């Protein structure tokens, strides 16, 4: 087993080393993203199953909100996204095309989005925009929703 950074010295580094050393995940070809390996995913499924059971016991239901949100929504979060805003991926086009020589793929410049989309899982702005439509009076409360 490789010598790990001490947890008390650098928790984040220790955790990442532990995940790799335990063969739970590995770095991928997508910068900043990891592949969760089968054993790591099995652990996640067990955790999720138990939490899902507990949530549902309290009346919660699962829902899914968009991963891509309009940049204008993201701007509403500006006050608390300062530290990570520069680390967001931005989608600007909705289609690719073959290059003229047919040897590669490129962005179709004619497929520019009207508004750029920001990759932002669990965006409060998209969730609250949805709740605004769901809640018409106090009778619609509480909303017991879980998003994985």
Image (cartoon, rainbow, N blue to C red):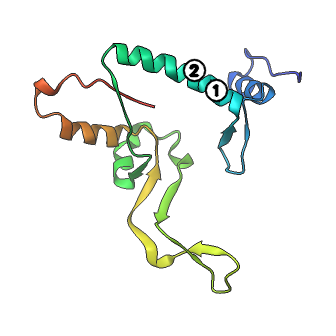
- Front residue of 49/70: it is 49
Q: Is residue 67 left or right of residue 25?
A: left
Q: Is residue 42 above or below residue 50?
A: below
Q: Position of residue 78 (x, y in %)?
A: 40, 43
Residue that appears at 83% across and 22% down? 4
Tally the numbered discs. 2
Give me the disc on residue 8: none
SS of the residue under disc 2:
helix
Is label 2 in contact with label 1 (beta carbons under 8 Å)?
Answer: yes
**Which residue corresponds to mark 2?**
46
Q: Is residue 138 above or below residue 106?
A: above
Q: Position of residue 60 (x, y in %)?
A: 33, 21
Q: Position of residue 96 (x, y in %)?
A: 54, 72
**Which residue corresponds to mark 1?**
42
Residue that appears at 39% across and 48% down? 74
Residue that appears at 65% across and 44% down? 32
Residue 114 occupies quadrant: bottom left
Q: Position of residue 77 (x, y in %)?
A: 37, 42
Q: CA distance from mark 2 to mark 1?
A: 6 Å
SS of the residue under disc 1:
helix
Residue at the far bottom in the pictured view = 100
- Front residue of 23/129: it is 23
- Front residue of 63/66: it is 63
Q: Is residue 38 above or below residue 1?
A: below
Q: Is residue 87 left or right of residue 140?
A: right
Disc 2 packing (10 Å; few <14; some 14–19; many ≥20): few
């Amino acid at each position: 087993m490789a010598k790990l950074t001490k947890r008390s010295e650098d928790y984040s580094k220790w955790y990442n080393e532990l995940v790799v050393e335990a063969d739970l995940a590995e770095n991928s070809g997508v910068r900043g993203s990891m592949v969760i390996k089968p054993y790591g995913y099995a652990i996640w499924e067990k955790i999720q199953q138990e939490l899902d059971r507990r949530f549902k016991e309290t009346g919660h239901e699962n829902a899914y909100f968009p991963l891509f949100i309009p940049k204008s929504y993201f701007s509403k979060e500006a006050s608390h996204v300062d530290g990570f805003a520069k680390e967001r991926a931005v989608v600007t086009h909705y289609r690719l095309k073959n290059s003229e020589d047919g040897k590669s793929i490129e962005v179709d410049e004619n497929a520019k989005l009207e508004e750029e989309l920001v990759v932002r899982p669990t965006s409060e702005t998209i969730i609250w925009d949805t709740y605004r439509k769901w809640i018409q009076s106090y009778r619609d409360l509480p909303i017991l929703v879980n998003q994985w």
